[in-house]
Image (spheres, grey):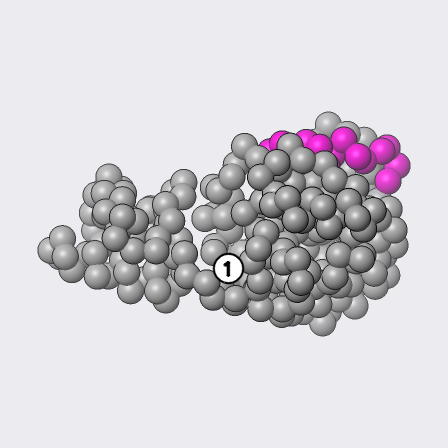
Amino acid sequence: MLFEARQRKIIEILERQGSVKVSNLARYLGVSKVTVRRHLDILSKQMPIVRVRGGALSNKEDTSYEPDYDVKSGKYLEIKQKIGSIAASLVSSGETLIIDAGSTTWHVASSLIGRSNLTVVTNDLKIALLLANTSGINVYLIGGKIRPYIFSSFGHSAEEYLKSFNVNKLFLGADSVDIEKGITNANSEESHLKQEMIHSAKEVILVTDSSKFNKVSFAKVSDFSVIDCIISDKKMPKKYKDLFIEKGIKLSLV
């Protein structure tokens, strides 16, 4: 396949999937990872494409668009690690938690390793696997339909299962945060599950990096009125800081 043909094929895949991985493209196109990276570097200068660790994603403003987990997990890694560490510091021994699915919430779970006498409920397969062999942490995995390449469960059965729990804290992730629309999510069925998580928790802690602000996704999750605390980074737009302070929401910016 000629260079131009490979470029066109990469563009087609990006437009269809919204994200691509270097390893998958190398296998599909029959070329080296180095060649794929060169293609992506060139395309990122010509089109609305964002290069991330291990791949690239489309920069289109589609409210139902959500990149694959592996693509998301490579973005803002250092910030997510700091957010996870701060979030875990809020957890006391003996508490019960819901940890929402996502690459930022994964770092919350990771920061809990080594702690004891905790109970974690999650719909994230990667988080469940991470904590499953951790002594001192009891893990409940929310069953349901699995989202391909996102590795989270959702659906009616998941919502019904969650109704049986009452927890101390929820660590909630978000696809988008907007000053007027509130917290929104790319997948409508997953947004319903997030709402059940909120109903099941005494305290709701939103964990999200600043890139999610000033964006709106397809389905409404909640207004800010249900949020008790927000952990983000210092690039959060000032108008949001002012709003959250006005509403009495605790802010922790890394």
Residue at image coords 88%, 54%? 166
Residue 227 place in picture, x, y as percent: 78, 52
189 magenta-colored: no
**Residue on which disc 1 sits:** 66
Picture quarter with the C terminus: top right
Residue at image coords 24%, 61%? 9
Q: Which residue lies furthest to the left in this view?
A: 2
SS type, badge 1: loop
Whether residue 130 is visible here, answered yes or no, is: no
Question: Number of numbered discs present?
Answer: 1
Residue at image coords 86%, 33%? 93
Residue 109 place in picture, x, y as percent: 68, 39
Asked which quadrant contains residue 147, the reply is bottom right
Q: Is residue 12 above or below residue 241?
A: below
Q: Which of 99 and 235 is in front in this view?
A: 235
Residue 70 place in picture, x, y as percent: 47, 48
Residue extent of the magenta highlight: 81-95
Q: Is residue 85 above or below residue 188?
A: above
In the displayed structure image, the side of residue 93 where residue 221 appears, left or right:
left
Picture quarter with the N terminus: bottom left
Whether residue 172 is visible here, answered yes or no, is: yes
Residue at image coords 28%, 60%? 11
92 magenta-colored: yes
In the displayed structure image, the side of residue 155 where residue 226 appears, left or right:
right
Judged by its main secondary structure, the magenta piece is helix
Q: Nearer the viewer, residue 12 or 128?
A: 12
Q: In this view, does 213 lie above or below 153?
A: above
Q: Residues within 10 Å of mark 1 (few under 14, many from 20)?
A: many
| Residue kind at label 1, given as amino acid type | Glu
